[in-house]
Image (cartoon, rainbow, N blue to C red):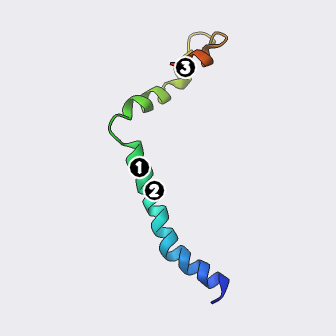
Amino acid sequence: METYTFLRQFADSWALLVLFLFFLGVILWAFRPGSSETHRDAAGIPFRHDDKPAPAGADEQEART
């Protein structure tokens, strides 16, 4: 069997299935119970120091908490 033909058949069958299962896993992981607090925290990152610049070392302190 020619290499291109083999890879084409593999991509059309098993690789498609693997990528679809990976997609479903990412979706389920993103919408899992209890992840809303993590997403809310990440969404607020650009607005944390909106009124003034962040103090020196603020990133290190936030990473520890």
Work out how far the residue at label 3 is from the one at label 1, CA to CA, in angstroms. Answer: 28 Å
Nearer-the-camera pick, 36 or 51: 36
Which residue is denoted by mark 3 in the rendering? 64
x%, y% of residue 62?
A: 55, 18
* Residue at image point 45% right, 68% down: 17
Mark 2 element type: helix
Cβ–Cβ below 8 Å for labels 1 and 2?
Answer: yes
Q: Amino acid at mark 1?
A: Ile
As drawn, 55 above or below 7:
above
As drawn, 16 above or below 5:
above
Q: Amino acid at mark 3?
A: Arg
x%, y% of residue 13?
A: 48, 75
Work out how far the residue at label 2 is from the one at label 3, CA to CA, in angstroms. Answer: 31 Å
Q: Residues within 10 Å of mark 2 (few under 14, many from 20)?
A: few
Which residue is denoted by mark 1 in the rendering? 27
Q: Quadrant of residue 21?
A: bottom left
Among the two numbered marks 2 and 3 on one chain, the one whose residue lies closer to the N terminus: 2
* Residue at image point 66% right, 88% down: 2
Q: Residues within 10 Å of mark 1 (few under 14, many from 20)?
A: few
* Residue at image point 64% right, 9% down: 55
Q: Is residue 1 left or right of residue 14?
A: right
Nearer-the-camera pick, 57 or 53: 57
Q: Residues within 10 Å of mark 3 (few under 14, many from 20)?
A: few
Q: Quadrant of residue 35?
A: top left
Among the two numbered marks 3 and 1 on one chain, the one whose residue lies closer to the N terminus: 1
Any mark on residue 23, and which?
2
Mark 3 element type: helix
